[in-house]
Image (cartoon, rainbow, N blue to C red):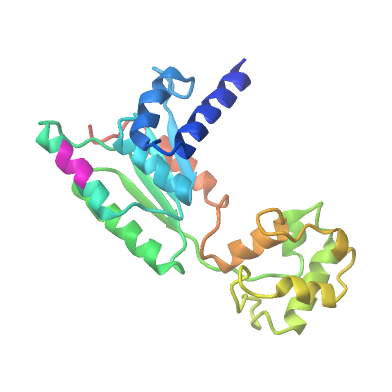
Amino acid sequence: SSSNSNSSSSRTLAALVHRRKGSPSAAATALPSTSILHPIIPVFGLGASSGGAFVLLLAMSGVHFAGICSEIMAVPQMLLHSHISSQKARGVSPVFPPTMFVHMPKDVRTAQRVHLNMNILKGQGVAVKEAAVLPRPLTPDHLHLACGPEVSLEQSRAIYAALSSASYLTQEGMLKQDPRQSAWRKVLKDAKVPSITEMRLEADASPVAEELNLLWARHEIISTTMSETMDWFESTSGSSNA
């Protein structure tokens, strides 16, 4: 029954997001009628990319999170200023949950916006934390360790060798080009990586593509910071600036 309730809650949110007139305010109104919120158990929000902006907007719209994490996204500073001003105009002290931003500094625009968001929230006494995710090197075994068993050790090493031979990697194994833009798939096919025709290579469906995006570290959902995020949530639980 818990699983069914969560599925129902997810569908409620999805409908609100995709509805033409849907808004975080509408979502905030609908959420209390779902099983997402609990009167005793702390509720935390986490979203990535547009989902990151959504949890920030939900917090501004009255959803009482114990903490939120926005990955690879921030909101325009005018929205935060507007939220603070509207609360003050109603004679209410601005309230916001502890907020963690996980982002990739290579995306300069988002990084700048993250820092602006952090400064505004800090100015209101909100607990804020930043986790910056930097590019990492590809190693011969990495794709097997990250994507196995779909990617075998043999395939992982063959992919590394193919990209290295095609000058797609620096001597340290760092990607030279954005994998969302480069022709790395053709490189792997031309190199006849074992069982390459059976490997998922489509964008948003390929574990190899997703992992290369993570190594490039410009804009991708991140799981490596999850333990840090959960530890921080636990340490700040109950420390809303209310």
The image quadrant that residue 69 belongs to is: top left
Q: Work out whether residue 160 can be spotted.
A: no
Residue in view at x 72 percent, y 61 percent? 208
Residue 190 percent across, percent down from the top left: 84, 77
- Is residue 50 placed above or below 202 in the rendered structure? above
Q: Quadrant of residue 125?
A: top left
Query: Is the residue 184 above or below the residue 16 in the image?
Result: below
Q: Residue at x 55, y 53 (%)?
A: 221
Position of 227 with respect to 66 (left or right) is: right
Main SS of residues in magenta: helix
Q: Is residue 89 above or below residue 105?
A: above
Q: Tell me residue 47's x, y (percent).
A: 48, 44
Residue 68 on the magenta span:
no
Q: Nearer the viewer, residue 218 or 232?
A: 218
Number of numbered labels in the structure image: 0
Which segment is the magenta one? 82-86
Q: As drawn, is 38 to the left or to the right of 96?
A: right
Q: Nearer the viewer, residue 2 or 79?
A: 79
Q: Quadrant of the C terminus?
A: top left
Q: Where does the image place residue 193, in percent across and percent down from the top left?
A: 86, 70
- Residue in the image at 26% along x and 43% along y: 126
- For the N terminus, the quadrant is top right
Residue 87 point in image, percent of width and height: 17, 35
**Residue 124 position by quadrant:** top left
What residue do we see at 10% from left, 36% from top? Answer: 89
Is residue 216 at all visible to an observer of this figure?
yes
Whether residue 156 sits left or right of residue 120 in the image: it is right
